[in-house]
Amino acid sequence: MSRTRDPERLEEILESATRTFIGRSYRQARMSDVANEAGVAPGTLYLYFETKEALFLTVLRRAFLREGFEPPEVLPVPTPAPGAVLDFVRRRLAAESRLASLADLGNEPRGGIAAELRTVLSELYDRVERFRFAVRVIERSAPTWPELFDLHFKTMRRGVLAELARYLERRIGEGHLRPVPDVPTAARVVLENVAWFAMHRHFAPDSATLSDRASRETVLDLLVHALVPGPNPENPSS
């Protein structure tokens, strides 16, 4: 069956599968759950995807590649080779977790420390928001998939935290950023605030009134002002 037979139905299935995997996780979700979410008979789903693993990999490919995603030409999508899902996630996390703004930093921040820090945080925020569906699917599925858990939490997430901590420690040591009680904790504060507003906010029912622009600009403003040296609020004359 060609992808041109019913591309809209394929898109509806992928949207429904994304919601299902986020809601139930890969291990807990059943193909019948996806079919119910999509409003199709379970048999119809198997005309598009041979197995749940084939569907899961396609959902991840669509979420990571976004505009570059090419719908499968051969349907039903066959079951991927053993390890293909983890290999794909490993490659995408490696490609997307490094921040270009932290490469080749000079001794003096370009445009001043506030501008440099805002650039770093902006890149991090936009990256998390751009891939929020892929990350949410992975985070939801990782607790019951040990290899996926290690890839996401132990490799990618810890790598991002370590990179942020090195940056903060360097700029603090150079006197550009204000000292903090614990640099790794500060890096975690930065990442958790960015992650909640750039990603988790989109899935929180009580956050619908927060706009994308207001969320982004407020988080960046607060984090920059928290880390760039300025008057001590406990001693305004300092």
Image (spheres, rainbow, N blue to C red):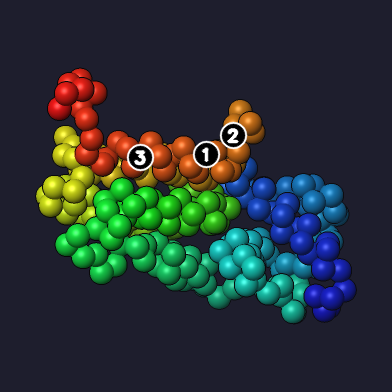
Give the residue displayed 22% in from the left and 39% down from the top.
229
The C terminus - image quarter: top left
Mark 1 residue crowding within 10 angstroms, few (<14) / some (14–19) / many (20+): some
Give the residue displayed 50% in from the left and 70% down from the top.
88
The percent coordinates of residue 31 (x first, y second) are 72, 54
Residue 13 in view, yes or no:
yes
Q: CA distance from mark 2 to mark 1?
A: 6 Å
38 on left or right of 188:
right
Q: Nearer the viewer, residue 166 or 212?
A: 212
Q: Are dots 2 and 1 in contact, CB under 8 Å?
A: yes
**Residue found at the far top of this picture:** 234
Which circle's residue, 3 or 2, is located before the other in the chain? Answer: 2
Up/down of 177 relative to 7, above or below:
above
Q: CA distance from mark 3 to mark 2?
A: 18 Å
Residue 149 in view, yes or no:
no
Which residue is label 3 attached to?
Answer: 223
Give the SS element for disc 2: loop
The percent coordinates of residue 78 (x first, y second) are 68, 74
Which residue is label 2 attached to?
Answer: 210
The percent coordinates of residue 167 (x first, y second) are 23, 54
The percent coordinates of residue 77 (x first, y second) are 70, 73
Which residue is label 1 attached to?
Answer: 215
Which circle's residue, 3 or 1, is located before the other in the chain? Answer: 1
